[in-house]
Amino acid sequence: MKKIKHFHSLSFKLTIWYILILAMIITLSGFFLYQGYKDKLTDELDKLLFEIADETYEAWRKKRGVSWQEAIQKIETKYSSFPLYIQVVELTEEKPLQIRNFIRSPRIPPGCLQLKPHLYRKADKTDLNDLIHLEVDDKRLCSFPLRTLLIPVRGPRILQVSLSTEERNKALNELILVMGGAGLLLLVLASAGGSLIISKALHPVSKVIKTAKKITADDLSLRIETKERSDEIGALVETFNEMIARLERSVKKIKQFSGDVSHELRTPLTIIRGEVEVSLRKDRKKEEYIQTMQSVLEEVGRMERIINDLLLLSRLEMMESSQLQENIDLSTIASEAISLRKEEASKKGLIIEADLPAPLFLTGHPELLMRLVINLLDNALRYTPSGGKIALEVKREGNNIKLQISDTGIGIPEKDLPFIFDRFYVVDPSRSKETGGVGLGLAIVKWIADLHQAQIQVESKLNQGTTFIISFPQQKNRNDEK
Ligand code: ADP
């Protein structure tokens, strides 16, 4: 049996899928968590920016004569612990827009916070509900990354307040580290757990494979333990066990059948060899040779019958009901069978009575149906002593067409009834030997009946007689047409 490579195994593939999906979920949740935290920190920063801008404006507006320079210095002193830059940008009325002056403290590095003129123009047109916030990340000019607020004030002037985002970015970077570590740990733990659960769930499948490998045609007695599982694996194991049981029964039947066949064929061969050896031991008269030859011929005929019956049985085993296409009148078949056996019956002193009404059609195979009737009729002829009566009837009963063959013969013991349709089953070997039966006739009848989806019933009383009833499903509307 093919060995499954680890990379191709179901448990490996499931584990990989599980890890991928888990990693995706962890990454997505991490992303949303990061984004939410960043928004919250930025909001706080924006609030502080607005507060500072408001205080600066108020410091300039309230005290008359205070210049922007002084107001800025006052606020910068108040917030000296913050990495804070404040400046006021004076705009001209000219077009294109010009920046007239930057009022700011000298501690702001030169070039830092000088935005593109159109941004100031845009800020000049905004109201308090729609202020402009900018992230300025130019460390070369400003030493650290900044978040900037632009507010239009009287002038036209723009009050520009910037705070360092370094603290916020640091907090966010720490969050990434913590989340990354925790996510990775979670992924490793969950993957290990998941892989353990998957391999545990699939363990019975490996047991099925192991047991299946041990099963050979010689040992079909092995079964896989189910431990009362009610899940899909349990159902699979149960189905597998049932399949093995069916296989075991079939192999047993095949073995018994081939044993029976060789035994049945060996018997006539032994008789032939014995007869020929005896007659060759010394010179014999012509009549004695003729007698030997006749006996040999009889045994050859017996072998021929066995082989023909076996060939027919194997042909029947290959056939399916769907192959039956013809509409056949069972009454005609029965009357033809009677004509074929009329002479033999009168020789044995037997009467055949027939009750065959109007044509009764069914879908079937004409030769096989003829064979079924002949086999039943032959048995009745074989096992009914001289002076007896055989009755053959074909009738319609409900949706079925029934063939009934009764005789007043020796009957079949009740204990043998369940087995008479088995191959090579003979009720009494000595009486079958006398009549030339080998135990295949009824097996053929059963196969033909099954092929036609017909039911067989047997009623028998010792020394009183036997009745076989075969119920065929009638072909719809066919008899009404006739
Ligand atoms: P055989 O070829 O030996 O007749 P069958 O398969 O036709 O084998 O029948 C199986 C056994 O059933 C026979 O050995 C016979 O003893 C018994 N049997 C079948 N039909 C009848 C019958 N009509 N009356 C009495 N016994 C019968």
Image: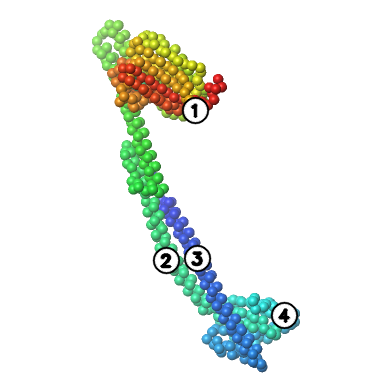
18 vs 112: above or below: above
Q: Which residue is mark 4?
A: 97
Q: Percent position (x, y) of residue 243?
A: 38, 39
Q: Earlier in the sequence, mark 1 or mark 2?
A: 2
Question: What's the residue type where badge 3 is placed?
Answer: Ser
Q: Residues under labels 4 and 1: Cα distance?
A: 97 Å
Q: Which residue is mark 3?
A: 29
Q: Quadrant of residue 182?
A: bottom left
Q: Earlier in the sequence, mark 3 or mark 2?
A: 3
Question: What's the residue type where badge 1 is placed?
Answer: Gln
Question: What's the residue type where badge 2 is placed?
Answer: Leu
Q: Earlier in the sequence, mark 3 or mark 4?
A: 3
Image check: 417 left or right of 162? left
Q: Residues under labels 3 and 1: Cα distance?
A: 64 Å
Q: Which residue is mark 1?
A: 323
Q: Earlier in the sequence, mark 3 or mark 1?
A: 3
Asked which secondary structure carries label 2, the reply is helix
427 vs 23: above or below: above
Q: Percent position (x, y) of residue 437?
A: 34, 19
Q: Which mark is residue 185?
A: 2
Taking depth in this image into account, of 282 and 345 the one nearest to the observer is 345
Question: What's the residue type where badge 4 is placed?
Answer: Leu
